[in-house]
Image (tube, helix red, strand yellow):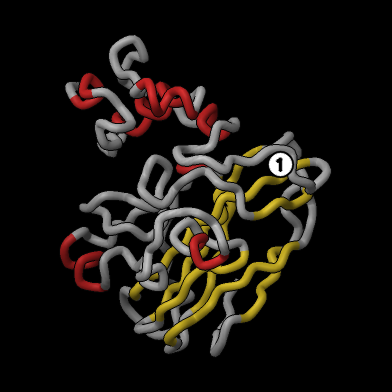
Amino acid sequence: MDHCIQTAKSCNIQHLTEDIDMLLQITVLVAFIASVLGHGRLISPPGRSTMWRYGYNTPKNYNDNQLYCGGFNKKWAVNGGKCGVCGDPWNEAHDNEAGGKYANGIVTGHFKSGQTIAVKVQVTATHLGYFEFRLCPRNSYNCDNNHNCCIGCGPQEQFYGCADIAISSSGTSQSSSTGTGVHQGRPFSFLPILGHKIGTCKATPLFKSRNPYADQFCVSQCNRNKCPPSTYCTDACRKH
């Protein structure tokens, strides 16, 4: 879905797949705003760093319009083109991913399987570019960056935003989380358990009280060398 944007506009995502027909499957909607100099934020559904602007009691990120991998130089010269799934700099804390500062697990959009939905991105500074929208089960997203369709040539600056949405058979709200921490629904059942053993790497008692899949989350993240802070996962997770 490629559009040149001058102001905040609605973009339709055609046909959410019928295969995603599970009850309250929590999904992350990832919006890429690839441009030369533009800035923007995902506003409908509101992204994790932008939720506070729409009445949610969540941490405030006043720079939510520049989740751009730390900037052009950091993304390409320092990190070799790598970037966090939600726009955080690759070599710094991934505050917008599950377990991070802005990822509170609060679902901001409810949709029905097969539904055509409208998504809004607010562009605060535009210099051409295009949008891409993708659905993925929480942090399982893996992107193959392909710049063949860029307007211009060479590596481009990229801006990201992640929002938590639910796709169910009815399209109505089944359950939601209003507290802090990561959502207690099913998404972490999708996270693979690799090298660590759950008996060794465990979540902290507070984190586990909020999320029944906390142990699996810690194991999976630490296996990817993205171990969350000690407030979420015990020190044993960082000793492997």
Placement of the N terminus among the 4 image quadrants: bottom right
Q: Residue at x 28, y 39 (%)?
A: 226
Q: Is residue 140 visible?
A: no
Q: Residues within 10 Å of mark 1 (few under 14, many from 20)?
A: some
Residue 202 spot, x, y in % from top left: 34, 19
Identity of the residue furthest to the top in this view: 199
Q: Is residue 121 visible?
A: yes
Residue 56 spot, x, y in % from top left: 54, 57
Q: Considering the numbered disc 1 on the image, is that residue within a helix, a strand or a loop?
A: loop
180 vs 163: above or below = above
Q: Residue under circle 1? A: 20
Residue 215 spot, x, y in % from top left: 40, 21
Left or right: residue 229 versus residue 37 is left
207 vs 55: above or below = above
Left or right: residue 2 versus residue 20 is left
Closer-to-camera residue (146/106): 106
- Tell me which amino acid carries mark 1: Ile
Q: Residue at x 34, y 10 (%)?
A: 199
Q: Residue 155, located in which quarter of the rendered image?
A: bottom left
Q: Residue at x 40, y 48 (%)?
A: 97
Closer-to-camera residue (52/188): 52
Placement of the C terminus among the 4 image quadrants: top left
State the count of labels: 1
Residue 148 spot, x, y in % from top left: 44, 72
Identity of the residue furthest to the right in this view: 170
